[in-house]
Amino acid sequence: MKTELLFMKQEDVIAAGALDMQKILELVEKVFYLQGHEQIINPPKTVFGIPIGEEPQSHFFSMPVYIGGDVNRPGIKWAAESKTNAKTGNLPMGIDMIILSDPVTVQPVAIMDGMVITAMRTAAAAGVAAKYLAPDDAKVAGLVGAGVIGRTMIMALKEVIPSLKQIKLCDLNTEKARNLADEFKGEIEIILSDNVENAVSGADIVATMTTSKKPFVKSEWVKTGAMVIQMSSYEVEAGVVEKSDKIVVDSWEQMKENELSIINQLVKKGSLDEKDIWSLSKVVCGTKPGRENKDEITMFSSRGMGSLDIIIGDYLYKEAMKKGLGQRLVLWDEAKWV
Ligand SMILES: NC(=O)c1ccc[n+]([C@@H]2O[C@H](COP(=O)([O-])OP(=O)(O)OC[C@H]3O[C@@H](n4cnc5c(N)ncnc54)[C@H](O)[C@@H]3O)[C@@H](O)[C@H]2O)c1
């Protein structure tokens, strides 16, 4: 019997609805809900860097997942990041693919570009965290990093924090920051900051999404009652984590395997107890509280979970089938050795 799958190029993924931040936030929150109800198998991602034995120039991540409940979808994300691409700017720094399979016959049903999905789901996870942990009535956000995740972070925060009036944006590449601010003209006020201290000081929400090799957010710049969002492993100094009253991560199971994570380093050093690090699923399911008062500092950090990509991929695949998007590919006409 012939086996076919749907190939979705990036344009199909977008036409199917990948840029609808409201929908992406809903799907991402559903993942945290299902995760809290043990309906997801999401083993820690495996990672390798190449070339072997040297400072890696690229990293590859394998992220297998099964989402249960009414989703019932196994799949895998094959993700990669290239330092060369980040330097030259000719190609995206991160390039990802998603494969979805049938849960019963195990046939592949779709293969699609995962780059836009990654950018959207990464910021949406922070958005869901902000829904539970940001100060009420937050007005000013200080953002560091005007790249791919910088763009989707603005989209997510605009959606979940309706009180947000102003974004202070900083990037080492000032032209990138200016261009990103221009993209959102008329939607929200974005003012450019020429250094991190200016961007972060006094902000109700601080968010970092950079490729920096060193921490750059000092604890004294984070005001009482703020929420701090860290998208990479070590953008904030240890003092910011130590100053935080609540530390929430996308998945502690995943993050504790990342040696670069500043949160993980503090646990290993013994200055932070892992029982004080909560997975966001606990907050979404109500087994741990979200923000409880206006003075606490909350922190969210993520390493990225494949389950977010697979639930979005599954939704977009179904939308593509309805809309007639994508291209049918034949895996075999007659399966050999049946
Ligand atoms: N947690 C997750 O799920 C997840 C998913 C995807 C990406 N990420 C991480 O998010 C980060 C951003 O990814 P991206 O795709 O937006 O990268 P990008 O290359 O598109 O953008 C990064 C930006 O950071 C800026 N930058 C670097 N160092 C800086 C510094 N010290 N101060 C100010 N700006 C600085 C660069 O100029 C660039 O504009 C990366 O570290 C990536 O690994 C995390």
Image (tube, rainbow, N blue to C red):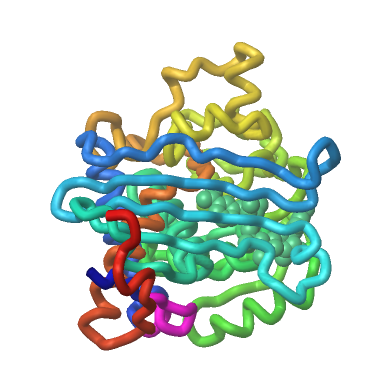
User: Where's the N terminus, which quadrant?
Assistant: bottom left
Is most of the magenta stretch helix, strand or loop? helix
Q: Is 204 on the left or on the right of 121, as rendered?
A: right
Return the residue nearer the eye: 209 or 88: 88
Q: Is 103 situated above or below 287?
A: below
Which residue appears at 53% of the width and 43% of the height? 303
Picture residue at 45% right of the left edge, 66% below the top: 117
Res 160 → quadrant: bottom left
Along the line of sight, the residue nearer the viewer: 301 or 165:
301
**Residue 243 seen in this snapshot:** no
* Magenta-highlighted residues: 7-15
Locate residue 155, reporting x and y percent. Answer: 46, 70
Percent x, y of residue 18:
39, 74
Quadrant location of ligand 1?
bottom right
In the picture as drawn, the residue positioned furthest to the top comes out as 270
Q: Is residue 277 visible?
A: yes
